[in-house]
Amino acid sequence: MTIRVLIADDQQLIRQSFGILLNAQPDIEVVAEAVNGQDAIDRIAARCPDVALMDIRMPVLDGLEATRRITRDFPDVKSVMLTTFDLDEYVYEALRSGAHGFLLKDCSAQQLADAVRTVATGGALLAPSVTKRLIEEFARGGAPRTVRRGRVADLTERETQVLALIARGLSNSELAAHLVIAEQTVKTHVGRILVKLGLRDRTQAVVFAYETGLVRAGE
């Protein structure tokens, strides 16, 4: 199956560069480009992409608000936020807005393609540097906290342990090695955690873990 992609960025060079890199992949096709958030929404309605690569900072309508509207109106479209800096102050809001991942514009061609494939198949993309930024937001008290601690009680002891490790940025293979269990078992635990907590993906699981205080910055 070919993954259909929209690239939204107000810089033509970025759009063209990413388009060339992605169109070189046998399973990915760039079906539309947009110069701002509103343009992206209009083109999504017309072209029905599977994945939208969204610059955060755009004129007319920025990537954050555009992603909120896309998540609401086009729930099947997976959004990946693009930024020049891994310390972008909007990373938390980007994840809260419904983004399925966060990608640096200086990523390699392979990282870009892998990111598109990951979110297209229902996964989430949260690089270690972005996880670090998210932790720093909570350390400063800059991110709003939601009282949802009671929902953690629905998890088993092992699931709670897995959730805490996800929040610290461990991949499934790293989780398996750390807990000395099979990677398939890790995937099963992750799936059950998401279902029990009503979360969409690992990205939301990270936000949830810090919001509830299950994991605290600096631990």
Image (tube, rainbow, N blue to C red):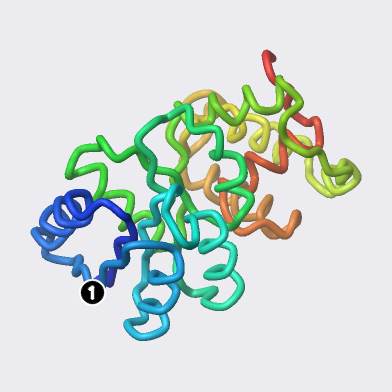
132 horizontally vs 121: left or right: right
Q: Secondary structure at mark 1?
A: strand
| Image quarter hosting the C terminus | top right
* Residue where numbered disc 1 is placed: 31
Toward the top, the furthest residue is 218
In this rendering, is residue 98 above or below 133? below
Front residue (pair 20, 111)? 20
Query: Along the line of sight, which residue is nearer the eye, 205 or 144?
Result: 144
Residue shown at the point (36%, 71%) measured from the top left: 50
**Spot occupied by residue 186 in the image (x, y as percentages of width and height):** 54, 42
**Quarter-wise, where is residue 75 in the image?**
bottom right
Residue lying furthest bottom in this view? 46
**Residue in the image at 63% along x and 25% along y:** 135
Q: Amino acid at mark 1?
A: Val
Is 187 in front, or is 200? 200
Q: Residues within 10 Å of mark 1 (few under 14, many from 20)?
A: some
Say whether residue 169 is visible: yes
Q: Position of residue 92 (x, y in %)?
A: 60, 40
Q: In the visual, does 76 lie left or right of 106?
A: right
State which quadrant residue 161 falls in.
Answer: top right
